Amino acid sequence: MRKNLMTTLTVLCMALVLDAHAQTLHYDKPAEFFEEALVIGNGTMGGIVYGGTEKDKVSLNDITLWTGEPCNMKVYSPDAHKSIPAIREALRQGDYQKADKLQRDVQGHFSQNYQPLGQLFIDYMDTDVAATGYRR
């Protein structure tokens, strides 16, 4: 019994090691655009890494930075979801002003946009030699 357990655990560990390479992200050049960059974070703080060998750029974000103000989330109407069919109907009819007015009732007063925390630029020292075999 113990031998079977050890054999099974050994096979599972080997499978995990072999699969780890398949779960690694590889890029052959730095990102030029937001859509090419690597998004990292924990749901509260985040960054967008562009990569680079001489210079790197990381766009930073934090959930507490937004264009609004502190609010009491209980101000929303519990019946707001009932407006959604009317919003859909206004959109189907092409009445975008009516749909916009109705959706503002759903989203409430405190719906605002997130703002970026800033840009972090990293200059790597001792990069006189051109990089080869780039991988990020």
Image (cartoon, rainbow, N blue to C red):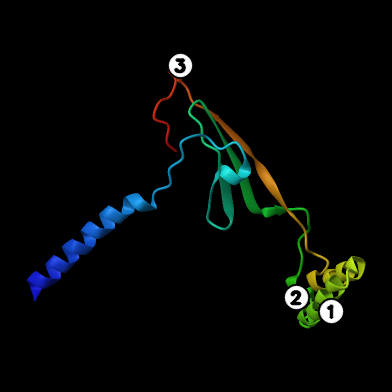
Q: Which residue is mark 3?
A: 128
Location of residue 46 with respect to 73 vertically, above or below: above
Quadrant of residue 83 within the rendered picture: bottom right
Locate residue 119, reporting x and y percent. 63, 38
Q: Which mark is residue 86?
A: 1
Label 2: which secondary element:
helix
The amino acid marked with disc number 2 is Lys
The front one of 8 and 61 is: 8
Location of residue 36 with respect to 108 vertically, above or below: above
Nearest-to-viewer mark from 3 and 1: 1
For mark 1, does the 10 Å Cα neighbourhood hold few (<14), some (14 to 19), or many (20 or more) residues? some
Nearest-to-viewer mark from 3 and 2: 3
The front one of 29 and 61 is: 29
Q: Which residue is mark 2?
A: 74
Query: Closer to the N terminus: mark 3 or mark 1?
Result: 1
Label 1: which secondary element:
helix
Quadrant of the drawing holding the N terminus: bottom left
Q: Are marks 3 and 1 in contact (CB under 8 Å)?
A: no
Quadrant of the drawing holding the C terminus: top left
The front one of 131 and 68 is: 131
The amino acid marked with disc number 3 is Asp
Query: Closer to the N terminus: mark 3 or mark 2?
Result: 2
Is 7 left or right of 127, judged from the image as shown? left
Q: Name the residue: 17% across, 62% down.
A: 10
Q: Name the residue: 78% across, 63% down.
A: 111
Location of residue 111 with respect to 27 vertically, above or below: below
The amino acid marked with disc number 1 is Ala
Nearest-to-viewer mark from 2 and 1: 1
